[in-house]
Every structure is written in structure tokens, then in C-alpha cells.
Image: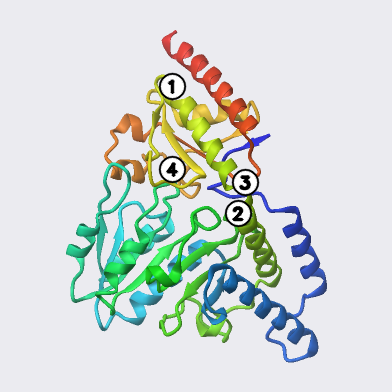
């Protein structure tokens, strides 16, 4: 099997699954319980929190565990909007955010917030000038994803953060879910107030994630009840998920140090091969894109037909975001960068992990050539 759909989800590391099972069996107590078993679990969670904080270069009390990236994004955006709405009700984001952010802003619009959706250029990047012109006295939040999940475009997060330092009353949220373990992000240099992460994007279990919340940032919680997670997220903690996620993050960051060049070589090889194949059009920008995402279109061929044809060869790729892949709508991201209907509706995304090899890339390219040739023959008949 060749699995090139790692932006949708990654396969958990074996060591991560072993940790999940061990913790489920041995540390099953509720960490809020005051007896010895509860205390042991609480200490385990606190240790995991410290390890994650050290991994990303923040304080341990700035890590809030969530059920995943969607909750982390919702908590960041709604939490700021609701908590600080008396100071202003204007929010800024981009046209190409993940659905968990885009839909959240649309929901806030319905209850009276004003949202500016920044346009992007042909590379999928925002303009710093557009951003600065959009800022108002009522602006309380800027939310921008670091790495786009469809195109792989990297946004100028550090530059945005430097600009926002001139507007200290505006909070800055970054969706780093596609970037973690692939594209480094410096929190202290980028002026980031909130940042979202999802475990299953870096070989951890599903149903677990975390939100970085800078010390001093007040959030209105989405989930109320208990006092867990510094009163920012009520609910009994997913202990095995948190501990397994912590191990997955450590292993992923280690792989990033050791195998990044191999991933870059794989992407460049496939991109070079596809650029020679008519009628393939490369959508991922030539410069300033993540090493693990490559998006291309084959106008005239339905992507779902191509995907199922490759699936028959035990090769797995995708179209747009997995959250939206079953929708018949054209990719909102590709429309935003200005592609016409044929190109935007025929896009394919391949996305890699550090276990993928160049030989897999070679097999994929040859299989794609065969599938495209066969489909073109059928269309001509």
C-alpha cells in the first residue's frame, strides 16, 4: 500500500498505540479524583503538558488540551470573540482557512460579528498591505493558518505578528495544524497569542489536540462544568490520548530533524515528473510551500474517478480537505486563488509523511500515467 493522504490523517506510530493501550489499562482513574490513583493520573497529565510545552517552546500553563484541531480552532476564535466583544466585534481571517475556522467565522457573522475575509494572490498568500488596511478600532482578532491544508502555501506568520505588535489590543491566532512537524514556527518571534494543534496530523490518536494560549489571554470557554484545563475547557481529560499524543509529537519532531531532506526530495521528484505530464497543472506554489503537500489538477478528468482508479492499485490520495471531500462543491481554496472551474474542480492532493519513500513516488507516478492514459482513451471513445 502507498498512502499519500497524510494531510487528511496520519497512521499512528506503533509506539504511540502501545502507549495508548498501556495508559488505558494502568492509569484509568479520573485525574480530578482526590485519591492516590487520581493523583497519579494527574501527575502523568502534568508531565505530558510540560513535555509538549518544551517541544514547542512555551510555558506548560499555556497548553490547553482539547478533543482535536476543530475544537482548538473553535475555542480560540469563539473564545476571544465572546470574551472581548464589548471592546469590539470585528474579526479578520482569510478566504482559504480550514473549514473548522471558516465555518466558525460564518457562524459568528450570524450573531452580529463583522468578519473581513482577506483575499489571497495566485500563490495562495495574503497581502500584508490588505491586512493592515483591514484593521479597525473595533478589531479584536486576526486568525490565519500557517500552512494551507490543500495547497501547502505558507503564510508570512512572523511578518503578520510583527505588524500586529503595533496593535497590542488585537489577538493573533494561528492554525498550525498542518504545519507542526513540517514547517517550524517560532512563537516568541511571531507574537502569537493562540495556536491550534491536532494529534492525528502527527501520528497520534484521533480525538485529541491542544491549544496554545499565551499567559494573560482571557478566553470564554466553549465547554463549561468542571475546572479542568485552567477553567478554559471543562470535561474529564482524555488521558491515554494526551499521553500518546505527547509521544507522537516527540517522535515526529525527531523525524523532522532526521528525514526532512528525504521528504523534500520526494515532493520535488513527483512535482518534476508531473510537470512533464500533459495535461497536469501544478497548483502548489513553486516557492514558499510546505514540504509534504503537492496539489495538481488534470482538467477533464473527475478527481473521484482518478482516486478510485488509483485505489485499485492500492495507492491512496485525496481531493480537497478530508472534511469537505464528500461535498460536490468546487474547492473554495482553489477558487480563491483564481483558478477557473475546470482546474478548481479537477484537483488532486498528495501529502506525505516521513515514512514515505522515493520508490513509492516512482510507483505513484507510473500508476498515475497509466490511469490518466486509460481515462483519456475512454473519454475519446
Instruction: Give the residue furthest to the bottom.
Output: 34
Q: Where does the N terminus fall, quadrant-wise? A: top right
Percent position of residue 350, x then y: 52, 38
Label placed on residue 286: none
Mark 4: few, some, or many residues within 10 Å (few <14, many ≥20)? Answer: few
Q: Nearer the viewer, mark 1 or mark 4?
A: 1
The structure residue drawn at horizontal position 64% and vertical position 78%, both measured from the top left corner, is: 236
* Foreground pick, 157 / 118: 157
Q: In the rendered image of this protein, does residue 243 appear above or below residue 152?
A: below
Q: Is residue 285 visible?
A: yes
Q: Which residue is mark 4?
A: 327
Label 1 Cα crowd, 10 Å radius (few <14 / some 14-19 / many 20+): few
At horizontal 29% and vertical 43% (from top left) the residue drawn is: 337
- Gap in angstroms between the C-alphas marked 3 and 1: 25 Å
Position of residue 48 measured from the top left corner of the image (x, y, whole percent): 66, 74
2 or 4: tag closer to the N-terminus: 2
Disc 1 to disc 4: CB gap under 8 Å: no
Residue at mark 1: 276
Q: Residue furthest top?
A: 381
Q: Is residue 149 left or right of residue 50?
A: left
Of mark 1 and mark 4, the one earlier in the sequence is 1
Q: SS for tag 4?
A: loop
Q: Secondary structure at mark 2?
A: helix
User: Counting residues from the N terminus, which is met first, the one under dot 3 or under dot 1?
Assistant: 1
In space, the residues marked 2 and 4 are separated at their CA atoms by 37 Å
Going from N to C along the chain, the mark reached first, 1 or 2, is: 2
Image coordinates of residue 311 in percent, x first then y, are: 61, 30
Look at discs 3 and 4 and give the one toward the viewer: 3
The reply to whether dot 2 and dot 3 touch (C-beta < 8 Å) is: no
Q: CA distance from mark 1 to mark 4?
A: 30 Å
Give the residue pinned by disc 2. 257
Alpha-carbon distance for marks 2 and 3?
Answer: 10 Å
Amino acid at each position: 500500500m502507498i498512502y499519500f493522504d497524510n494531510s487528511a490523517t496520519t497512521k499512528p506510530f506503533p509506539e504511540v498505540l502501545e502507549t495508548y493501550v498501556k495508559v488505558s489499562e494502568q492509569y484509568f482513574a479520573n485525574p480530578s479524583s482526590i485519591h492516590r490513583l487520581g493523583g497519579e493520573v494527574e501527575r502523568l497529565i502534568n508531565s505530558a503538558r510540560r513535555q509538549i510545552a518544551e517541544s514547542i517552546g512555551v510555558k506548560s500553563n499555556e497548553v490547553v488540551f482539547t478533543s482535536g484541531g476543530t475544537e482548538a480552532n473553535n475555542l480560540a476564535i469563539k473564545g476571544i470573540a465572546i470574551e472581548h466583544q464589548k471592546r469590539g466585534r470585528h474579526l479578520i481571517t482569510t478566504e482559504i482557512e480550514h473549514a473548522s475556522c471558516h465555518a466558525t467565522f460564518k457562524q459568528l457573522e450570524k450573531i452580529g460579528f463583522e468578519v473581513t475575509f482577506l483575499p489571497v494572490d495566485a500563490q495562495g498568500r495574503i497581502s500584508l498591505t490588505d491586512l493592515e488596511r483591514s484593521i479597525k478600532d473595533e478589531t479584536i482578532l486576526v486568525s490565519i493558518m500557517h500552512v494551507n491544508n490543500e495547497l501547502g502555501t505558507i503564510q508570512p506568520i512572523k511578518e503578520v505578528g510583527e505588524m500586529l505588535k503595533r496593535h497590542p489590543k488585537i489577538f493573533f491566532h494561528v492554525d498550525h495544524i498542518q504545519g507542526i512537524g513540517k514547517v517550524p514556527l517560532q512563537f516568541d518571534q511571531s507574537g502569537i497569542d493562540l495556536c491550534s494543534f491536532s494529534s492525528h496530523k502527527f501520528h497520534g490518536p484521533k480525538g485529541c489536540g491542544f491549544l496554545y494560549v499565551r499567559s494573560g489571554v482571557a478566553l470564554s470557554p466553549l465547554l463549561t462544568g468542571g475546572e479542568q484545563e485552567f477553567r478554559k475547557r471543562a470535561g474529564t481529560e482524555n488521558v491515554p490520548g494526551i499521553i500518546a499524543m505527547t509521544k507522537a509529537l516527540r517522535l515526529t519532531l525527531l523525524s523532522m530533524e532526521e528525514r526532512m531532506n528525504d521528504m523534500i526530495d520526494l515532493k520535488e521528484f513527483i512535482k518534476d515528473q508531473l510537470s512533464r505530464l500533459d495535461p497536469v497543472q501544478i497548483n502548489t506554489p513553486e516557492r514558499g510551500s510546505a514540504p509534504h503537500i503537492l496539489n495538481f489538477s488534470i482538467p477533464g478528468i473527475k478527481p473521484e474517478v482518478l482516486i478510485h482508479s488509483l485505489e485499485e492499485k492500492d495507492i491512496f490520495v485525496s481531493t480537497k480537505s478530508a472534511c469537505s471531500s464528500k461535498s460536490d462543491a468546487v474547492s473554495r481554496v482553489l477558487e480563491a486563488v483564481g483558478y477557473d472551474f475546470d482546474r478548481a474542480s479537477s484537483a488532486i492532493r498528495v501529502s506525505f509523511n516521513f515514512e514515505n519513500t522515493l520508490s513509492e513516488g516512482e510507483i505513484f507516478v507510473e500508476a498515475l500515467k497509466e490511469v490518466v492514459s486509460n481515462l483519456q482513451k475512454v473519454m475519446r471513445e
